[in-house]
Amino acid sequence: MKIEIQGLNQIYPNGNHALKNINLEFGTGMFGLLGPNGAGKSSLMRILVTLMKPTSGVVLVDGKDIQKNRKEIRALLGYLPQDFRFFTSLKTWEFLDYSGSLAGLKNRKERIKEVDRLLDQVGLLEVRDRQANRLSGGMKRRLGIAQALIGNPKIIVVDEPTTGLDPDERIRFRNILSQLSQHDVTIILSTHIVGDISSTCQGMALLNRGELVFSGSPENLVKHADGHVFKLTLSPYDYERVKEYYNIISTIPVETGWEVQIVSDNPPEFSSTNIIPNIEHAYVYFMEHKLHTEISD
Ligand code: ADP
């Protein structure tokens, strides 16, 4: 399934320009959309799931304009919104059963079979009879992904699914998504947590203040930061000076002062060693530095 986003702009009635000429293309597998709060991720997600019409530009799914083929596109979609909440006294399985009937699964027997298959997939089978609103935060989010998956969608859109989850649940959720991505589906994962973007993502995009800052593979993002991350050992006096001029991304106390890592366009004017960047370094590099210079893949 090929998704093409062409010249997308979203300007809200109050003048907020939430998406600025976004062009992106991706296919089957997991696609990560990374950016800080206010970057425009949710706006893009809402457009992708046809809940909002963009101010200008188009989104094509296998060449079809989603605005002109809403019914058809919606039948392919599963969506876990950022503010997924439910106020229900239904049991967990009943809630999913209800979602299934909304998704058009008419045969009750088959639907219940599918409900249990999904509850098992997201690790909720043991709590199938618990009242859904009594589930823990992480479990509720997993029920959210289960409701997004019912009806076998080909495109799964999950908006900030790991926000507020504890580390265990976050890992669990990531594992569910990466298992899903091995099937013939397109998963669009929006997040402001760099750690959510892993090598499981074939492609990714970095958004900042409505602008596309990077698109490509996570490996490619990291490659851009190569030669721009440095390790320095500093006396307390030099630490203060470095802090003024450079972006410190980690600080570890050592006997003589501090060992710090910085991201910088050029080698710092202090004795330093170059270190191999990771995705966190690359994120900082793009957000703090590259944005002010040139933007490319
Ligand atoms: P993200 O999901 O990355 O946090 P959003 O898409 O929610 O970003 O928001 C992008 C920008 O658009 C922000 O400046 C936000 O305040 C603004 N925005 C979002 N929704 C609306 C709205 N309904 N009306 C006006 N401005 C909005």
Image (spheres, grey):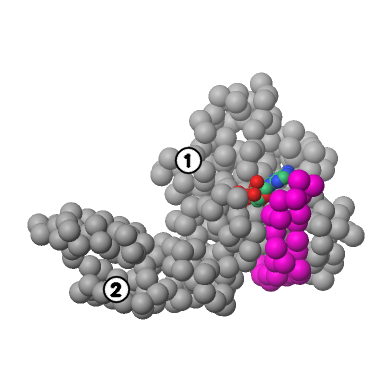
203 displayed left or right of 226: right
Question: Secondary structure beneath disc 1?
Answer: loop
**Amino acid type at mark 2:** Pro
Identify the mark nearer the N-term, 1 or 2.
1
Q: Is residue 14 magenta?
A: yes
> Which residue shows up at 36% across the image and 77% down it?
266
Vertical relation: 168 (above or below) 295? above
Magenta residue span: 1-30
Image point 37% across, 71% down: which residue?
Answer: 264
* Residue receiving disc 1: 165
Q: Main secondary structure of the magenta part?
A: strand
Q: Number of callouts in the render? A: 2
On the question of residue 5 being in view, the answer is no
Task: Give the residue at mark 2.
Answer: 268
User: Residue 15 or 65: which is nearer the viewer?
Assistant: 15
For the point 20% across and 62% down, the residue is 238
Looking at the rendered structure, the kind of residue marked 1 is Leu
What kind of element bears circle 2?
Answer: loop
Compared with residue 249, is residue 163 higher up or lower down, i.e. above or below?
Answer: above
